């Protein structure tokens, strides 16, 4: 098995397996059941030609299906030059565990295309994406019933719209064609709140963590989330939204942002929105007003802070830098940012980790809502919103009649307002993130052999998965 380029030791896939094995051992899970759960069910590799600027270029992509105990299998498609079969398999496995942890009834899958999207124009990317989607659909790896991709590193709403449209042309009589992919633009069957869902989920998870005083104390914190300092790696979809919401709504001070070409630092706090605009305009965070620039971005991970949020890519904290990490809490927004070896070191140092398989589940939770919306062919809240508003108005009238005094404006506003799709999505996401962390904390505290939230999360995932495998029967 090859090793991952980012780490000296285990491959990404081995790293995930080792972490899962810790839970298997604690649970005393039948090794055969564990092997069945851990195995990747199938993986497709495709190589296809696309004519770019008059020349034929070959592209290679993968789609791994880790589990099919629930259908469809779900997971993003990433465009990056780090992509290989091993990475896609590791990410597909994480999807299986993630869905089980947050109770989303999907199997786990993941796809990737070996490409640097910045090397191509929009039209070229459209051509490449449509061709990739055709390969996936023709080989049974894209369909609303069995395999549903979503955005990941290097892809977004635009690519999802192209994939959906390609599938529709190939399957004109599939009435649910729009559900073949999630993370689409709202005008093309997407759901409000999906783009920022993963970052929003990070915020909700941290809010929930700080509602548990004993956990907060054991992590070495005093007080609540407000006023804490954070370092964020990756100002892409996940990192930008997490940093924006935490700083603007929870008073978290973002003291450093790390990107592929260095880090910007301001101990008084960075204006995330402005930094994001600067990055979009110039292609880099470098030179953002009022910040110091650190050319060795990796060193930024070692800055003194309360919360470290790696939100870029896997393997960034390994055995070479884990000893130098000074954060009290690591919120794993990216998939696999901490290697197995680093995890051991960080635990010994007493650094608490909120694991990826839970932390970044916001994306798949809202993807689940989008998929349901697509299958029901109706926007959430469409039927009941005005009815709820009318009922709220009746309550206001009744209160006024009973007390012979007007209901204050703010109460009236709250009572009379019916929930729209955005409210419902946020409520469902918040609820899912809260419940999952409560279960993780409870599990960690129930069993004295469990010393970390990651193992607790995997114990939860494995017990749900093994129950399903045993109920259905492995044949
Ligand atoms: P993205 O492509 O939108 O953003 C990634 C950001 O990281 C970019 O700004 C990029 O410049 C930066 N980056 C790349 N290499 C870097 C390096 N070496 N150091 C620092 N920064 C670097 O991707 P994303 O969708 O935000 O995904 C980020 C991570 O979150 C990935 O691990 C992904 O699998 C995970 N994730 C994403 C979603 C989602 O909904 N998008 C859901 C779950 C998990």
Image (tube, rainbow, N blue to C red):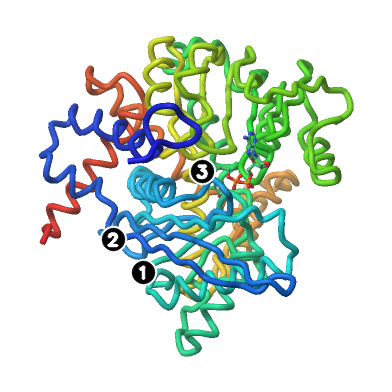
Q: Position of residue 412 (x, y in %)?
A: 69, 50
Between 26 and 322, the residue placed more toward the observer is 322
Name the residue furthest front: 55
Q: Nearer the viewer, mark 2 or mark 3?
A: 2
Quadrant of picture, ligand 1: top right
Q: Dot 2: what SS?
A: loop
**Residue contact at pointers 2 and 1, CB within 8 angstroms:** yes
Placement of 49 over or under 5, stated as above or below: below
Q: Dot 3: what SS?
A: helix
Q: Residues within 10 Å of mark 2 (few under 14, many from 20)?
A: some
Between 107 and 279, the residue placed more toward the observer is 279
Q: Dot 1: what SS?
A: loop
Is residue 370 visible in the rendered structure shown here? yes
Measuring 43% from the left and 46% from the top, which residue is drawn there?
87
Residue to which mark 1 is pinned: 146
Residue to which mark 3 is pinned: 430
- For residue 56, side relative to residue 23 (left or right): right
Could you give the CA–CA distance between mark 2 and mark 1, rounded to whole angstroms?
Answer: 8 Å
**Residue contact at pointers 2 and 3, CB within 8 angstroms:** no
Which disc is residue 68 wearing?
2
């Amino acid at each position: 098995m090859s090793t991952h380029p980012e780490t000296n030791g285990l491959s990404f896939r081995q790293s995930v397996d080792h972490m899962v094995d810790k839970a298997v051992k604690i649970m005393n899970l039948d090794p055969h059941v564990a092997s069945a759960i851990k195995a990747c069910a199938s993986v497709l590799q495709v190589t296809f030609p696309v004519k770019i600027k008059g020349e034929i270029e070959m592209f290679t992509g993968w789609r791994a299906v880790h589990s099919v105990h629930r259908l469809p299998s779900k997971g993003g498609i990433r465009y990056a030059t780090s992509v290989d079969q091993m990475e896609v398999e590791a990410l597909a496995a994480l999807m299986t565990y993630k869905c089980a942890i947050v109770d989303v009834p999907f199997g786990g899958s993941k796809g990737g295309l070996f490409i640097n999207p910045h090397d191509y124009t929009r039209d070229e990317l459209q051509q490449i994406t449509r061709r990739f989607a055709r390969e996936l659909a023709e080989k049974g790896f894209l369909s609303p019933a069995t395999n549903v991709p979503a955005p990941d590193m290097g892809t977004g709403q635009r690519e999802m719209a192209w994939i959906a449209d390609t599938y529709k042309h190939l399957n004109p009589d599939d009435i649910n064609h729009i559900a073949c992919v999630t993370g689409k633009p709202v005008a093309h069957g997407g759901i409000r709140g999906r783009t920022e869902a993963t970052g929003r989920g990070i915020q909700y998870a941290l809010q929930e963590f700080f509602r548990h005083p004993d956990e907060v104390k054991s992590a070495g914190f005093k007080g609540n989330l407000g006023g804490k300092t954070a370092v964020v790696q990756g100002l892409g979809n996940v990192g930008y939204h997490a940093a924006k919401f935490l700083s603007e709504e929870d008073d978290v001070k973002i003291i450093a942002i790390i990107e592929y070409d260095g880090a910007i630092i301001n101990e008084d706090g960075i204006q995330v929105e402005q930094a994001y605009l600067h990055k979009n305009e110039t292609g880099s965070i470098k030179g953002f007003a009022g910040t110091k620039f650190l050319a060795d971005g990796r060193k930024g991970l070692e800055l003194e802070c309360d919360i470290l949020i790696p939100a870029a890519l896997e393997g960034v904290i390994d055995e070479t830098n884990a000893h130098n990490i000074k954060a009290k809490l690591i919120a794993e927004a990216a998939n696999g940012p901490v290697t197995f070896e680093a995890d051991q070191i960080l635990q010994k140092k007493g650094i608490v980790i909120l694991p990826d398989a839970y932390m970044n589940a916001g994306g798949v939770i809202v993807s689940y809502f989008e998929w349901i919306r697509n299958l029901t062919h109706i926007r959430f809240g469409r039927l009941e919103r005005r009815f709820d508003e009318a009922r709220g108005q009746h309550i206001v009238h009744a209160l006024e009649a009973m007390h012979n005094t007007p209901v204050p404006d703010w109460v009236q506003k709250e009572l009379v307002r019916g929930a729209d799709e955005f409210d419902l999505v946020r409520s469902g996401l918040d609820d899912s993130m809260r419940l999952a962390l409560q279960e993780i904390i409870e599990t960690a505290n129930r069993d004295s052999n469990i010393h970390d939230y990651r193992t607790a999360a995997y114990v939860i995932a494995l017990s749900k998965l093994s129950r399903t495998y045993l109920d259905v029967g492995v044949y």
